[in-house]
Image (spheres, grey):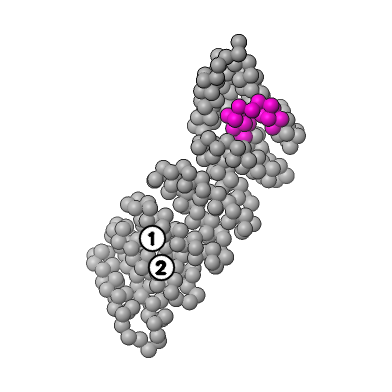
Amino acid sequence: MSERQAQELLQQADKRLNGWSWFGGGNRQEEAAELFEKAGNTFKLAQRLPEAGDAFTKAADLFKKTPDTNYEASKALENAAKCFKKSNPEAAIGALKDAIAIDKDAANFRNAAKHHQEIAEIYESDIVDLEGALQNWQEAAQLYMADDSQAMVNKCLLKVAYFSAQLEKYELAIEKFEEVATASVDNQLTKWSLKEYFLKAGLCHLCTGDHVRTQRALERYCNMDITFENTREYKFLQSILECIEEDDLEMFTQKVYEFDQMTKLDQWKTSILLKIKKTMLEEPSLT
């Protein structure tokens, strides 16, 4: 029933678009766009998602040609992306990119940022393109900054740091972890997270192999937050740095085990520590 109704709505939209009207073409386009939207929603009820996506895309194309319907065009493209996501992730990304262009032109930076987030999540989960995810989290952060939404900026920058480290872009990861930490120092709601940001930045520093710079970074973190020196995270970073400098792989493994027993290591930290361990194994011993 829903599928047949959707097909009828498509036919009505085509007739409205191609028919003659006293009110001119613009009005016909908007009416046809609304019918295409209804068809899209009806296809969704019938679980015909590719057809629903196509109908929403047609609606968006018409809304783009109609004055003062930027919001409707962006919303239709967002709905199209949701329908395409499972069957055609690339088409979903294309729809969201079109929505971003519309929202940017309308200075709707928050909505454009949200669409970049959605693209990043598709790259992360459906296409598995970490570089694409990283770039879109960066774009989202910039747009949230333009919207003066610091909490969302921080969320996006942490994602940038997370993926940068996975891609072994440690300098960028350090920069973003430290940027979020700096923005959080004077915020009572986020200050409790400082030790986590410092820990992740410190691990990325250790991946660079620059021990002097790593030590200076730890000292700087202690100056930013006087409580950090007494935390388990600080002591763990110092102990790992000592293990690396002394080329003591056995002690390194022991320190990681002890920390994990007290504070469970997540997958990201574990992967970074494995990279540090691999570096230790590859470097020739000085002893």
Q: Position of residue 121 (x, y in %)?
A: 46, 48
Marks 1 and 2 close (CB-CB < 8 Å): yes
User: Does residue 45 lie above or below 162 as drawn?
Assistant: below
Residue 80: numbered disc: 1
Quick check: can you spot residue 251? no
The picture quadrant where one finds residue 45 is: bottom left
**Residue 215 within the segment the image draws in magenta:** yes
> Which residue lies under the disc numbered 2?
60
Q: Secondary structure at mark 1?
A: helix
Q: Position of residue 212 (x, y in %)?
A: 69, 26
- The residue positioned 57% from the left and 36% from the top of the image is 170
Q: Position of residue 63 (x, y in %)?
A: 43, 72
Quick check: can you spot residue 111? yes
Q: Secondary structure at mark 2?
A: helix
Which residue is nearer to you in this view: 18 or 30? 18
- The residue positioned 30% from the left and 75% from the top of the image is 14
Query: Magenta span covers which residues?
Result: 200-217
> In which quadrant is the C terminus drawn?
top right
**Residue 64 within the segment the image draws in magenta:** no
* Mark closest to the chain's N terminus, 1 or 2: 2
Residue 155: numbered disc: none
Which residue is nearer to you in this view: 33 or 163? 163
Residue that protrudes farthest toward the bottom in the picture: 22
Relative horizontal placement of residue 202, taking residue 84 as reference (left or right) = right
Q: Say which amino acid is labelled 2.
A: Ala
- The residue positioned 71% from the left and 34% from the top of the image is 221
The picture quadrant where one finds residue 73 is: bottom left
User: Does residue 231 lie above or below 117 as drawn?
Assistant: above
